[in-house]
């Protein structure tokens, strides 16, 4: 990866990325309705991706010499690009084409950050940018009001999503950086309690961190391996229990009683079952084998009765689903979904079973959790959540990282 100014190019890419994501958030329903801003978002997202492509020297990637995770990511990327090309001819209405180039394609190309994450020095540069610049600027977000004059609590919490990844870096960072991470994580929860995915991710990251400090290396290694297999079978077990015994886990949470938190526009029940109907609606839209295996294209959609008169319904159809893997199923079918799942499981396996340090195992456990949570949430957007996800997949696949000891990592990934 040779170039004249890689750090400057990476910083520029991150800046354009954040501009794009910021505009995406503030142009959501209930905030700002401005078509020009959406075109600026479109341009900023592609500039960010272009700069990342310039950082990757694909000439160094000869397929027959690649490690298994590199082959999987290339297969996943190529499959989606072909799928996107075909989508232009299958779904060719104006809303379809707009969704393809404004949302689906940028999200698809986010996996290019995998190749950036493979290089520890680049991951460090991004963490430095986030800690030293982005988190501090993020405090200004708390001063930005909604159009009705109330405080925009959701905007800050969604922008600060990288903190869920940075928590597991705490053993290797300086005290001042750890204080920043802790403060941002608490603020992001307090300012938007209805953002339950954020609470779950942060809680799980702190659980991994506590385990890192509480257990010695031998016990931590054993627990990591057991947890890996337990987390793999959780979604499979749930699906089997649902179809065989009619057991609905989401509905069981709902039976615990209502737990409402206040939002700027009302109240939200955090224990409500808001997922089962999404599965039913999507599966009802897949009647033929072709759509089931190959999906409906990157700009594919499904008909939704629940959202017909609400948000997210465009020209009689809905393009995005709040459940990450369900969204993959709609757009890429079982083939694309299985490629993604196999990639996550393989990278997590390498990080947990083929590493010499506890950090890699924490990273592997974090990624395998994303596999589980992909059946519940993780809406697919061109956002900082998935940017850090692909960076982390790349980092976990790095044999160089996995071969370091924890003592060596304290010097390599430390940010003062």
Image (tube, rainbow, N blue to C red):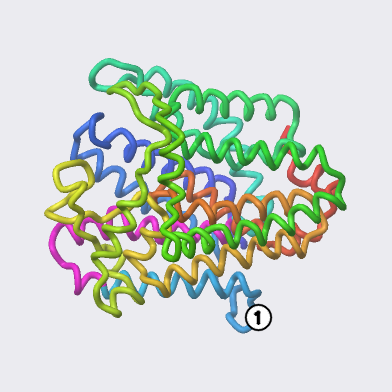
For residue 124, side relative to residue 372 (left or right)? right
Name the residue carrying label 1.
65
Residue displayed at 24% across by 22% down: 147
Quadrant containing the C terminus is top right
Residue 87 picture location, percent across and down: 25, 71
Residue 110 among magenta residues: yes
Look at 37% across and 56% down and name the residue there.
106
Q: Position of residue 207 (x, y in %)?
A: 68, 39
- Seen from the viewer's position, the closer of residues 333 and 357 is 333
Name which quarter of the figure residue 151 lies in. Answer: top left
Give me the residue at 43% from left, 27% from top: 259
Q: Main secondary structure of the magenta part?
A: helix
Query: Which one is nearer the viewer's eye here, 5 or 262?
Result: 262
Query: In the image, 218: left or right of 226?
Result: right
Read off the magenta span: 87-116
For the residue pair 287 and 253, the one nearer the viewer reads as 253
Is 207 placed above or below 294 here?
above
Q: Secondary structure at mark 1?
A: helix
């Amino acid at each position: 990866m040779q170039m004249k100014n890689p750090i400057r190019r990476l910083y520029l890419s991150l800046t354009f990325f954040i501009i794009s994501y910021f505009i995406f958030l503030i142009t959501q329903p209930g905030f700002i309705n401005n078509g020009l801003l959406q075109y600026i978002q479109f341009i900023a997202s592609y500039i960010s991706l272009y700069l990342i492509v310039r950082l990757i020297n694909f000439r160094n990637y000869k397929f027959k010499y690649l490690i298994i995770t590199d082959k999987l990511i290339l297969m996943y990327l190529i499959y989606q690009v072909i799928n996107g090309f075909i989508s232009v001819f299958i779904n060719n209405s104006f809303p379809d084409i707009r969704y393809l180039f404004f949302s689906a394609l940028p999200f698809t190309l986010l996996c290019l950050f995998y190749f950036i994450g493979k290089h520890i020095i680049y991951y460090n540069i991004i963490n430095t940018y986030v800690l030293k610049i982005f988190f501090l600027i993020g405090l200004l977000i708390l001063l930005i009001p909604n159009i009705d004059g109330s405080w925009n609590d959701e905007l800050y919490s969604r922008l600060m999503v990288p903190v869920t990844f940075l928590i597991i870096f705490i053993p290797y960072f300086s005290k001042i950086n750890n204080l920043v991470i802790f403060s941002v994580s608490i603020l992001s929860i307090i300012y938007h309690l209805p953002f339950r995915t954020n609470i779950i991710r942060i809680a799980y990251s702190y659980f991994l961190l506590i385990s890192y400090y509480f257990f010695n290396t031998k016990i931590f290694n054993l627990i990591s391996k057991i947890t890996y297999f337990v987390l793999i079978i959780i979604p499979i077990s749930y699906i089997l229990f649902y179809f065989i015994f009619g057991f609905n886990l989401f509905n069981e949470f709902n039976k615990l009683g209502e737990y409402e938190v206040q939002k700027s526009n009302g109240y939200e029940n955090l224990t409500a079952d808001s997922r089962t109907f999404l599965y039913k609606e999507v599966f009802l839209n897949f009647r033929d084998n072709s759509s089931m295996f190959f999906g409906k294209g990157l700009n594919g959609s499904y008909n939704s009765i629940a959202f017909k008169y609400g948000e997210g319904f465009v020209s009689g159809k809905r393009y995005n689903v709040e459940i990450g893997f369900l969204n993959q199923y709609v757009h890429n079918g079982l083939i694309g979904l299985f490629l993604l799942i196999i990639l996550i499981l393989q990278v997590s396996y390498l990080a947990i079973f083929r590493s010499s340090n506890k950090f890699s195992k924490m990273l592997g456990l974090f990624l395998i959790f994303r596999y589980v949570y992909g059946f519940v949430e993780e809406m697919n957007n061109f956002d900082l959540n998935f940017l850090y996800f692909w960076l982390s997949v790349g980092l976990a696949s790095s044999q160089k990282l996995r071969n370091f000891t924890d003592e060596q990592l304290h010097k390599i990934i430390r940010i003062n």
